[in-house]
Image: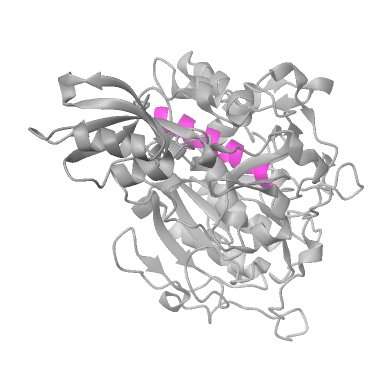
Amino acid sequence: MNQTPKGRIRWAVTALAVAACAVLPSTAAAAERAKVIVQMESGASAASAIAQVRDSGGSITGKLAIINGFGAELSADAAARLAKADGVKAVTRDGAVEPQDVKASDLLTAYPFSTTATQSWNASLPATGKGVGVAVIDTGIAGDLADFRVSQSDTRSRVVATARINPGSTKAGDQYGHGTHVAGIIAGNSFNRSSLDLLRGKYAGIAPDANLIDVKVSDDDGNATVLDVLYGLQFAVDFKDQLGIRVVNLSLESTVPQSYKVDPLDAAVEAAWFKGLVVVAAAGNRGVAADAVSYAPGNDPFVLSVGGTDDAGTRNLSDDALASWSARGVTQDGIAKPEINAPGARIVSNLAPGSAFGSMCPTCVLTGGMIRAGGTSMAAPMVAGAAALLLERYPNLTPNQVKGVLVESARSLPGGLPGLDTYGALKRVEAGNVPVANQGLTPNPLVSAATGEIDYSRSSWSRSSWSSATGSQSADWSRSSWSRSSWSSTDSSGVETSRSSWSRSSWSTSWTK
């Protein structure tokens, strides 16, 4: 039976208990003194600059005649003022990290270690996701944050395109906060912050040099429907070559459980998969409930579904365990889900300035524009980032090969469950061992596995007649760029499907869990 693309979407995020927030303590870095290197202009005397340091309560740590400068220790505010003083050429933080050697030992978060991403960054053939595009189909991305810059010196954003899909979205960016948090897990990189920022080098996503494509399917309040997500997937498919999209992250799910053989969202993710995109989906946060893994798109047998683990906030891999809320089980079609698990508890990532996320859990907000949250919404982007690392190093891998490699190289968690091992995946391909997943699966009957095309004549929902968007990669493709009118949005009785959005109570977003 064909189904209309109606229904609500819930983001697969669960917030963390206030009591649990003590695991990864908030830093007081903003109040600490910074060790800096001061360079003077050629021929300029350092006397006045040294006096300014001492007047601000700082101290001189050494003279550096070789660069006509000196070392100093002073507050961040005083360092910023010193950088503007007459005769001062530059004030840089001591111990700046060279881009090709990420000093992971400085990171405040555990998940880059528990996913072995840090080993991937600093391998003999390093992988950081550079040049790989990841489409984040979500509530938007605050793309002007320093952590999304190309580099410390190149302040262009790695959020290379924005598509506003939802008719209720009035502007780009992320007013809700979910999408920015997800994007930071994939490709945040605090090494691109100012050298005077005391949190520089303290946070990094799994693929810290990857490009991001912001596919904003929610309205400004974070609400979305299945129809919006279908349009978002269509955008990713239509612009995959122009924007270099290789991976799609879906930290969301339908609120209506249906077989993948009739669900339009499952049909859409399969179409994207067969078109060459690695689709990563959150498994959901219903634990072992009877219907825990019965919702699209995480119930689709082709896509890579991700459960959530708790790394206990440590770099020690032996204490990692499956989170109690992480959905697992068998779908209504007999498919075991999820295929892999990744850290999803107490995950620190970027906070969109002024977004609702900050007000929903003020005690979860950390200094430096970061926030702690959890759920399979946070686990899925770990795997999306790992896929970007693989595709940077081995761009000819197909989606079935990427899935096969990630699943087969997973390390064993307690109970024998598979946990993400990004470095192990890279080593597997390097050794020439490339398993192929999804063999023998039956696609959604509406989708051609050979071409990725959907047979709309057999469905109750038709293809959109997308118009061609113009502009550079940094353009904001607003909803006005697209024709939505040809989508059928009626139910089986011919009544127009309501676009009313799901309530926040239908999210797995409990800030007391």
At x 77%, y 45%, the residue is: 16
Q: Position of residue 412 (x, y in %)?
A: 73, 19
**For residue 512: magenta?**
no
The residue at 81%/21% (across/down) is 414
Q: Does residue 442 show up? A: yes
**Bounds of the magenta segment:** 377-393
Q: Position of residue 195 (x, y in %)?
A: 36, 37
Q: Quadrant of the N terminus?
A: bottom right
Taking the view exactly as shown, the residue that stands out farthest to the bottom is: 495
Dominant secondary-structure state across the stretch colored magenta: helix
Q: Residue at x 55, y 22 (%)?
A: 425
- Which residue is farthest left? 43
Write down the quadrant of residue 101 in the picture.
top left
Judged left or right of residue 108, residue 301 is right
Return the residue nearer the eye: 193 or 61: 61
261 vs 291, nearest the viewer: 291
